[in-house]
């Protein structure tokens, strides 16, 4: 190869390399600037035509009631027994109670058994009287039930913790 050609190629290559190296800092600055913009892209207010409808239903805050359940059975507790704890709206006397929330506890431990029942406050709707009902069951067979009303929430009830006593079913 001719030395003159080599001499003319080497300076060009050197200039290209210098240009490429000078682009990297600019590229790095651009990447950092874009990353910063994406962090602050939600900074402005976003107004929706229907703000309440735009909020997902799962964002509502759940609440809970706690308490304990006491029972005495004439026979040993079957291994497959379970407790069914229900929070019900009992406001309307001329209609069946509306279930607000229900929790199943299985396996059932020795008495007393602690419970926690969660509910969405928006499910309370316009109800004013609520009660906790508890059933001790083995499959479809009822073993024990609370025979007195345990009022909670609303105008006549407690916010918890509550104590519920079950009576064995003959």
Image: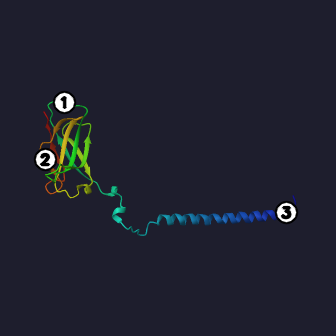
Q: Is residue 143 above or below residue 133?
A: above
Q: Nearer the viewer, residue 152 or 161?
A: 152
Quick one: label 3, few (<14), some, or many (20+) residues within 10 Å?
few
Report helix, strand or loop for mark 2. loop
> Residue shown at 73%/64% (left/top)?
16
Marks 3/1: CA–CA distance: 102 Å
In this view, the residue in front, 50 or 146, is 50
Cβ–Cβ under 8 Å for marks 2 and 1: no
The location of residue 29, given as percent across then percent down, is 58, 66
Q: Secondary structure at mark 1?
A: loop
Q: Position of residue 59 (x, y in %)?
A: 34, 57
For label 2, the crowd category at 10 Å Cα-Cα, with few meaning under 14, some 14 to 19 and many 20 or more, is few
Residue 149: numbered disc = 2
**Which residue is the extreme one toward the front?**
94
Report the residue marked by disc 3: 5
Q: Which residue is mark 1?
A: 76
Lower sequence index among marks 2 and 3: 3
* Label 3 residue SS: helix
Q: Are marks 3 and 1 in contact (CB under 8 Å)?
A: no
Pointer 3 or 1: first along the chain: 3
Q: Residue at x 47, y 64 (%)?
A: 39
**Marks 2, 3: nearer the viewer:** 2
Q: Closer to the camera: disc 3 or disc 1?
A: 1
Residue 155 location, quadrant: bottom left
Give the distance between the C-alpha atoms of the residues marked 2 and 1, in whole angstroms: 26 Å
Q: Quadrant of the C terminus?
A: top left
CA gap, disc 2 to disc 3? 103 Å
The part of the image, by quadrant, that contains residue 112 is top left
């Amino acid at each position: 190869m001719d030395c003159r050609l080599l001499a003319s190629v080497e300076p060009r290559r050197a200039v290209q390399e210098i240009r490429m190296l000078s682009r990297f800092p600019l590229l790095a600055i651009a990447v950092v600037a874009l990353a910063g913009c994406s962090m602050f892209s939600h900074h402005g207010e976003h107004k929706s035509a229907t703000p309440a409808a735009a909020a997902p239903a799962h964002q509502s805050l759940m609440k809970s009631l706690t308490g304990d359940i006491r029972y005495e059975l004439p026979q040993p507790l079957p291994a497959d027994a379970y407790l069914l704890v229900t929070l019900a709206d009992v406001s309307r006397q001329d209609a069946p109670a509306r279930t607000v929330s229900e929790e199943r506890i299985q396996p059932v431990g020795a008495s007393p058994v602690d419970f926690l029942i969660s509910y969405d406050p928006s499910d309370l709707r316009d109800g004013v009287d609520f009660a906790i009902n508890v059933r001790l069951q083995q499959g479809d067979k009822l073993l024990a039930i609370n025979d007195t009303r345990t009022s909670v929430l609303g105008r006549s009830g407690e916010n918890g913790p509550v104590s519920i006593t079950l009576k064995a079913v003959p």
